[in-house]
Image (cartoon, rainbow, N blue to C red):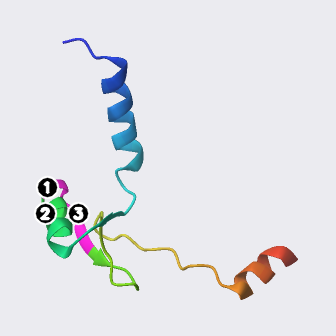
Amino acid sequence: MQTTDDDYFAQLSEQSFAYLPLHHESKEAAQAHAERKGFEVYQDLSGSYFTAPHGYFPLRPMTFDDEKIVQML
């Protein structure tokens, strides 16, 4: 079976983004995606549902104080 450039880039794209969180329009959509991929369903502070691998630890958003510290470095 011959692989086309489109197939190669689709596989590369899927591998590159596989472990990033993916937001969904509803809890049901998130649960369905999580079951297909073997991921967990999480909920962010705004109430939005997303899927990510088990043990995903979201980064804390930067605050104005953080920006001042970064500028001082």
Kindly identify the residue that appears in the image at 38 percent across and 35 percent down: 12
- The magenta stretch is 36-41
Q: Nearer the viewer, residue 39 or 49?
A: 49
Q: Is the C-beta separation of discs 1 and 2 under 8 Å?
A: yes
Q: Residue furthest right?
A: 72
Distance of label 2 from label 3 (alpha carbons): 10 Å
Residue 6: mark: none
Picture quadrant where residue 47 is located: bottom left
Would you place residue 37 above or below residue 49 in this image? Answer: above
User: Circle 2 is placed at which residue position?
Assistant: 32
Q: What's the residue type where badge 3 is placed?
A: Phe
Residue 39: mark: 3
Residue 64 position within the rendered picture, expressed as x and y whole percent measured from the top left: 71, 85
Kindly identify the residue that appears in the image at 39 percent across and 84 percent down: 46
Q: What's the residue type where badge 1 is placed?
A: Arg
Q: Residues within 10 Å of mark 2 (few under 14, many from 20)?
A: some
User: Circle 1 is placed at which residue position?
Assistant: 36
Q: What's the residue type where badge 2 is placed?
A: Ala
Would you place residue 7 above or below residue 36 in this image? Answer: above
Q: How many marks?
A: 3
Report if residue 37 lies within the magenta region: yes
Kindly identify the residue that appears in the image at 34 percent across and 42 percent down: 14
